[in-house]
Image (tube, rainbow, N blue to C red):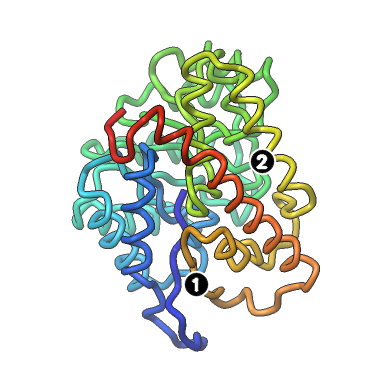
Amino acid sequence: MIPAFTKDMEITLESDDTVDADRLIDCVSRMIDDGVDVVSAMGSYGEFHTLTDNEFKTVVRATLDATKKRVPVLIGVTSMNSREVVRKAKIARDMGAEGIFTGVPFYYPPTVDNTIYFYEELADFFTDLSIQVYHNPPLQNIHIPVHAVGKIAQKRNIVSMKDSHRSTLEFIKLMDATKDNMSVFVNQLQYYPYQGMGAKGFWSTDAAMGPYPLVHYRNCTDAGDAEGAKEVMRDITAIAAGSFEFGAPEDNSRKIGAAHSGYANQGPNRPPFRVIRPADLEKAIARGVGWGKLNEKYKPRVQARVPAGAAR
């Protein structure tokens, strides 16, 4: 999951060109060289909710320019209604995107039946696109039940799901319901042990601070090296304590703190994230610094095992 990099500029309420395409291209290219094997743009951390239409197009163009079809790309098109999802998906497709991901429109908490209908209707409309279900219960006001996901997964071009909010037992039931029809990506700290239950990958909003800890974690988990995977989990958890409470009131301080990893400067915040609480910023900076140290620790291990830029 990549951020929508921001130019170093004064952003007003009328600004319409805040995306720093050069920063985005540089960071995404490096992430792929360093082992990332899927790129998703404009999720929650990717600020689909703060970008103008012009900026949406800039992110699509820059992401596709950076990846150059080296890895799969998913463009986020989550919106407040189905017609806007379709409009943005058309733009992405016409610019060359082959995959999209979207949450269900969520201003009113959606019903399960309408959630199923939304994804089925979208799949029937875009038969030429691969579609990922973006499941984010705290922000989208729905926990999509297993039986509903199983029904959605019957659509041939709904190929994957970004998930994370399930117990181990519910996840096992999810795998039973979706069978081989859908690849499920879990939160980074769930991949071990969920990979052994059927998870095909994991998503991370930390990867743009440097993917080395995550690539090593993935490699260990895929190789059955439980102790190696748990070492990374302990290290990430140690720097994460108190830095970000998912679903709580958000001032986007972690975007500012991320620059302190030394991997990439994501730029300043966009409106409405004008006021950053000092305590939040202090924690975010500490986490960025801590992540930089994890990069130093795990980069040699990644490069010793998988040469930079090598295909997996």
Q: Quadrant of residue 88?
A: bottom left
Residue at the image position 44 percent from the left and 56 percent from the top: 42
Relative depth, front residue between 18 and 258: 258
* Residue 10 as seen in the image, left or right of residue 24: right
- Disc 1 designates what residue? 267
* Residue 245 as seen in the image, left or right of residue 88: right
Mark nearer the N terminus (2 vs 1):
2
Relative depth, front residue between 124 and 66: 66
Instruction: Indicate the amino acid at tag 2.
Output: Ile
Relative depth, front residue between 26 and 110: 26
Q: Quadrant of the C terminus?
A: top left
Residue at the image position 44 percent from the left and 34 percent from the top: 302
Q: Is residue 115 visible?
A: no
Report helix, strand or loop for mark 2.
Answer: helix
Instruction: Indicate the amino acid at tag 1.
Output: Gly
Residue at the image position 65 percent from the left and 29 percent from the top: 231
Q: Is residue 24 visible?
A: yes
Above or below residue 263? Residue 37 is: above
Above or below residue 143? Residue 179 is: above
Task: Give the image location of residue 145, x and y in percent.
Answer: 61, 27
| Number of residues whose C-alpha sits closer than 10 Å to that of mark 1, classed few (under 14), some (14–19) or many (20 or more) | many
CA separation in Å, label 2 and label 1? 23 Å
Disc nearest the viewer among 2 and 1: 2
- Disc 2 designates what residue? 236
Above or below residue 6? Residue 132 is: above
Relative depth, front residue between 57 and 105: 57
